[in-house]
Image (cartoon, rainbow, N blue to C red):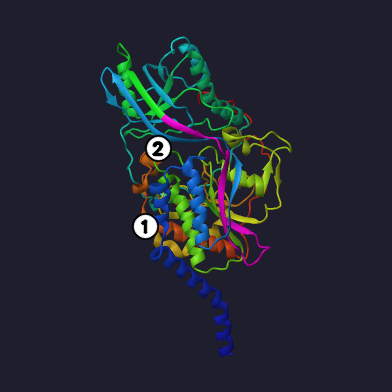
Amino acid sequence: MRHLLLATAMLTAAPAIAQDATTNRIIDQGTNHSQVMTTAQHLTDVIGPRLPNSPQMRAAEAWTQAKFREWGLSNVRKEGFPFGRGWSIDRSSVRMTAPRPIQLTAIPIAWTPAARVTAPVIVAPMRRERDFARWRGQLRGKVVMVTRPTDLRDPTDPVVQRLSGEEISKLDTFEQPRFDPTALPRNLRRSDFPQKLDAFLKAEGAVAYATMSRNDGKLVHGEGWAFEVGSPAAIPGVEIAAEDYRRLARLAKMSPAPTLEIENAVRFHDDDTQAYNILADIPGSDPKAGYVMAGAHLDSWVAGDGAADNAAGSAVVMEAARILRASGVRPKRAIRFALWNAEEEGLLGSIAYIQRHIATRGPAGAAPLNGDKLYYSFSNQWPITPLPGHRDLAAYFNIDNGSGKIRGIYAERNPAAAPMLREWLSPFAAMGASSVVVSPTTGTDHVFMQSVGIPGFQFIQDPLDYDSRVHHTSVDTFDHLKGEDMRQASIVLASVLLSAADADQPLPRPPLPTQPVVTDPFAYPQDEDE
């Protein structure tokens, strides 16, 4: 009997022993043989910022596919979707020429046209359409400073932050969803304002416009909007560092107004208006088991090199793929890796994947949307119609919070998934990744997966200096990436993906959403300024 019990115990322990051995191989690959930082360095130092449909983004699309193939992944491909124009900066200069010459810290606003102008400034703050009346007839021949100057804000938070256990525990709070049908038309009106401002400035004869950076410290961003074919910006635009903008505004209070010289050499790229997601697979042993998926957005803005946002996440996803392939795993479910495009313009790449493979939203035959209109409308279109691939996708995991180490997973209002997620993280408690919190996160590519009933998750990561100085700014470069953190994140992601792919039962799915009732039927609509 003792021999029989011992044999039974050994057979029962065999899967656990095999799993432990695989975890050790993953850790070995992710530490002693890591390529995550060389991947990130190529995406940033070599290729640089990756605005959709720019030459740099085309280079990134080709290079990432080549790396996936080099590492032995299957079905490496790009999937196109309608986007619009590419745009890139050759060189730019913004100088104050009077009352004294100063080189200003500034950047062209994305998708605005080239400029070679010298003109006086006028401070004419405009953030609502009704503001136009105040400035009508005063803007001809001027560089219009359209942001109201704000005072310098003394920093009170640390520049670089690591999350404490107490801070993480505060995230474990269930936030009830809210449905306000008045929010959609309000958001759509706000999204139309930049185009209306551009048209007003052109009609008034302005030669250029300038905005003020939202960050102090001579940081600039350069985000823009006019990428769609058929709706180009008419007026050159620049974003000026907050300190330089305030100086101009002070001088404009005196007489005469300061003069700016703007020389922006920029190019539009219209040869291919499709943007492309990059996809690659590790096949599953059970064709009927479906697949799990990890994704990060490959695109970025252009002020820096798009390092923390989001070459870091892209490199971690790619490294997880390399680790798993090099570890020789044979998962039950396939594992798919996605590098999304046009996340910064409204999660457009992940929406395109959803609409092609997962589900459609809204009535059949509805006119296609793009940009902010698609972003704001997608979760408000009914009904949801699952496609045949809806049941195939068992879980989606997203990386888009900079280069900080993974500290856990947001369960995203899916408390039934929390026990499995905790179990999958358990080998990595000593690496700092152990927490599962139920609260949701917003603003990146898992959001619309959830909106069509897919278990979608984002990782808790140490913020580092992501929000304080890096996010979308001119210092978003390789220097701000932490190699030790990114190696840890790659290991954790690879292991969680493998656990999800091999689980006997997939993660619990939320119900397929249906149109909700109004959360507060007694609320009055917000004012447009709120």
Query: In which quarter of the view is residue 293 placed?
Result: bottom right
Q: Amino acid at mark 2?
A: Ala
Residue 112 percent coordinates (x, y): 47, 28
Q: Is residue 170 left or right of residue 288?
A: left
Rounded to the nearest angstrom, the CA distance separating label 2 from label 1 is 26 Å
Residue 297 can be seen in this image: no
Position of residue 445 relative to residue 518, above or below, is: below
Report the residue that reaches farthest toward the left: 100
Start and end of the magenta stretch?
A: 265-293
The residue drawn where x is 43% and y is 18% is 207
Find disc 1 in the rendering and name its residue.
484
Kindly identify the residue that appears in the image at 51 percent across and 64 percent down: 324
Q: Residues within 10 Å of mark 2 (few under 14, many from 20)?
A: many
Callout count: 2
* Left/right of residue 198 with respect to residue 378 in the rendered view: left
Q: Secondary structure at mark 2?
A: loop
Q: Which residue is mark 2?
A: 303
- Label 1 secondary element: helix
Left or right of 54? Residue 368 is: right
Tell whether position 478 is magenta.
no
Q: Mark 1 belongs to which amino acid?
A: Glu
Residue 291 figure quarter: bottom right
